[in-house]
Image: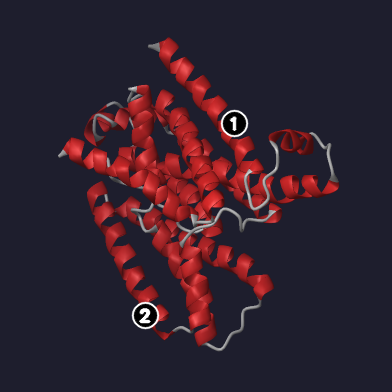
Amino acid sequence: MKGRTTILFILLAVLCAVLFVVDIAVGSVAIPLSDVADALLGKGSDEIRSIVLDIRLVRAIVALLAGAALAISGLEMQVLFRNPLAGPYVLGVSAGASLGVALFLLGAPLLGIAISPALQSIGTAGAAWIGSAVVLVLVVTLSRRIKDIMVMLILGIMLSSGVGAVVEILQYFSSEASLKSYVVWTMGSLGDVTATQLAVLAPVILVGLTMAVATIKPMNMLLAGERYAASMGLNISRTRFLTLTSTTLLAGTITAFCGPIGFVGIAVPHIARMLFRSADHRILLPGTILAGVVMLLTGDIVAKLFTLPINTITALMGIPIVVYIVTRKR
């Protein structure tokens, strides 16, 4: 069993490395893999190095971070809520980000505030970040007062519905140009993140992943239920706080910079469970990270080949997994 697990880890790691290089090579202008390798080593023509290092390398790193972040946040939510269909956005993180972006892109023009193209990208990410942060504060505050985790789930769904209603009102009164900008954001994109933004995104994702690693043992204990975990001495409130904060940092940051990317958080943890045949999070957590990276790098390669939004690709990849889970669980 240990030998099989080790082989799987090695295969997934090699696949991640291969897909990472292929993702850099694929684009509007195909670049041979040998030229990609030269550019990464600082060799080759200035034009190829500029394309590889300044544009495609940043996008590939964003895909890697997004895959890991969304997959782990989905794993955390499924364990916390003990629900196989729970995802990183069940607490309204995506809804909060969407409201922030809607207020920025749709609300500002209604108030007569002009948004310059230069500020639109930075402003959109900042507005989504603030919206996610507001939801984080609200969720953490409620988690300290409400002990029933299912009530938290219901509140998250209600919050998302309420935010959706507000966004629809803003859409109804918005101009065509503002509405188009918002709709494009909702489709998700890995290519809009600049190197400067990546310098902000990467550390936050690493903090969220570190917090997830710190909850490996508590997550294993929670598999038997909160009552059992509490009887074994686990601090449920602290574990819930760490998990919710980690999830919101991971999902909220990716949503802020890349837009809402669906189905990765729901589907990937189940892929990892099927591959590794284990419920031990010491194996599942790194396995889920690798599987998430593979899924999003693959999705980004397909999205670039067919010039499609990343959200459509992840949906087409994730929906069959979710359908299989539902039919298997009946």
Q: Earlier in the sequence, mark 1 or mark 2?
A: 1
Q: Give the residue at x 34% y 29%.
A: 273
User: What amino acid is found at the position of numbered circle 2 in the picture?
Assistant: Ile
- Seen from the viewer's position, the closer of residues 87 and 245 is 87
Q: Is residue 6 above or below residue 17?
A: above
Mark 1, mark 2: which one is toward the viewer? 1
SS at mark 1 in the image: helix
Q: Is residue 232 above or below residue 154?
A: above
Residue 212 in the image, given as x and y percentages of width and height: 46, 37
Q: Is residue 98 visible in this depiction of the protein?
A: yes
User: What amino acid is found at the position of numbered circle 1 in the picture?
Assistant: Val
- Seen from the viewer's position, the closer of residues 230 and 258 is 258
SS at mark 2 in the image: helix
Image position of 101 (left or right of 28): left
Q: Give the residue at x 69% y 35%.
A: 33
Total numbered badges shown on the rendered structure? 2
Image position of 255 (left or right of 51): left
Q: Give the residue at x 54% y 26%.
A: 13
Reading the image, the residue beneath label 1 is 18
Residue 70 in the image, given as x and y percentages of width and height: 45, 45
Residue 169 tag number: 2
The quarter of the picture where the N terminus appears is top left
Q: Quadrant of residue 93?
A: bottom left
Q: Give the residue at x 56% y 45%.
A: 63
